[in-house]
């Protein structure tokens, strides 16, 4: 027959294992949702041609954009998952630079660029969980606004993405994260600069930095 002390000890042991199992289950929860803000900074490289002839020294310049974002990750194994990241579509204002600096604002482009990546997080059941990933992003142009470039159009593009980040969990479900992606996006913009048809090959290649809160489900 178990004594009262033995029963208490057994109860404590069982509760300890139960809590450990719960933490383990949550640490390997299949879903993770990240809510935060994203900063997008473009490389701003361009080749600009008018009437089929490249304009020497012509380029573009844009400011970094900050937008709210969400990332949803579904882990299919203990360490590997599929991650979809998206945010409020930013509006990039391209200004002329170099020999086009006097033209001022050339074009505004609003676009959506969700990124789908495969992530590997070998320590995701721990409090500090670094990860890496790779995948693709699809840049879809939602609208353009003419500046010095009239009748403007910008092509969509599909490009590769590399990713790295870390999540810090102070509890079982909630934490904070920081993530950096490098996308390789190239596109073309068309329009008229005065009477002359213009084509610009834009190398966007944004660095996408994100930070916010994480929730495991």
Image (cartoon, rainbow, N blue to C red):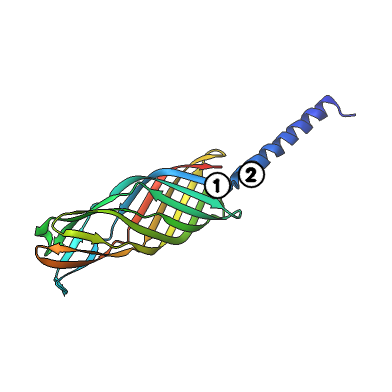
**Residue shown at 36%/54% (left/top)?**
208
Q: Tell me: residue 172, above or below residue 140.
A: above
**Residue shown at 20%/59% (left/top)?**
152
Q: Is residue 171 visible?
A: yes
Q: Tell me: residue 73, above or below residue 8.
A: below
Q: Which residue is mark 1?
A: 31
The kind of secondary structure element at disc 2 is helix
Q: Position of residue 33 (x, y in %)?
A: 49, 45
Q: Which residue is mark 2?
A: 25
Q: Is residue 64 visible?
A: no
Q: Residue furthest top?
A: 4
Q: CA distance from mark 1 to mark 2?
A: 12 Å
Q: Quadrant of the N terminus?
A: top right
Q: Quadrant of the C terminus?
A: top right
* Residue placed most toward the observer, 132 or 112: 112
**Residue shown at 25%/53% (left/top)?**
92
Numbered disc in front, either 1 or 2: 1
Q: Tell me: residue 43, above or below residue 34.
A: below
The kind of secondary structure element at disc 1 is strand
**Label located before the other in sequence (1 or 2):** 2
* Residue placed most toward the observer, 52 or 7: 52
């Amino acid at each position: 027959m178990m004594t009262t002390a033995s029963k208490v000890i057994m109860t404590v042991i069982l509760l300890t294992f139960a809590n450990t199992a719960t933490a383990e289950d949550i640490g390997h929860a299949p879903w993770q949702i990240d809510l935060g803000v994203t900063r997008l900074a473009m490389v701003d490289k361009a080749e600009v041609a008018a009437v089929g002839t490249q304009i020497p020294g012509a380029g573009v310049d844009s400011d970094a954009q900050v937008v709210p974002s969400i990332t949803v990750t579904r882990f299919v194994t203990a360490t590997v998952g599929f991650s979809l990241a998206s945010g409020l579509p930013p509006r990039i204002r391209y200004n002329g630079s170099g020999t086009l600096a006097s033209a001022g604002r050339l074009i505004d482009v609003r676009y959506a660029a969700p990124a789908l990546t495969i992530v590997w997080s070998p320590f995701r059941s721990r409090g500090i969980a670094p990860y890496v990933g790779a995948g693709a992003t699809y840049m879809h142009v939602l609208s353009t606004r003419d500046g010095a470039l009239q009748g403007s159009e910008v092509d969509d593009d599909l490009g590769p993405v590399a990713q790295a980040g870390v999540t810090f969990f102070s509890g079982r479900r909630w934490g904070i994260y920081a993530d950096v992606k490098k996308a390789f996006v190239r596109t073309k913009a068309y329009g008229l600069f005065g009477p002359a048809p213009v084509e610009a090959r834009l190398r966007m290649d944004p660095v996408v930095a994100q930070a916010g809160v994480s929730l495991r489900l």
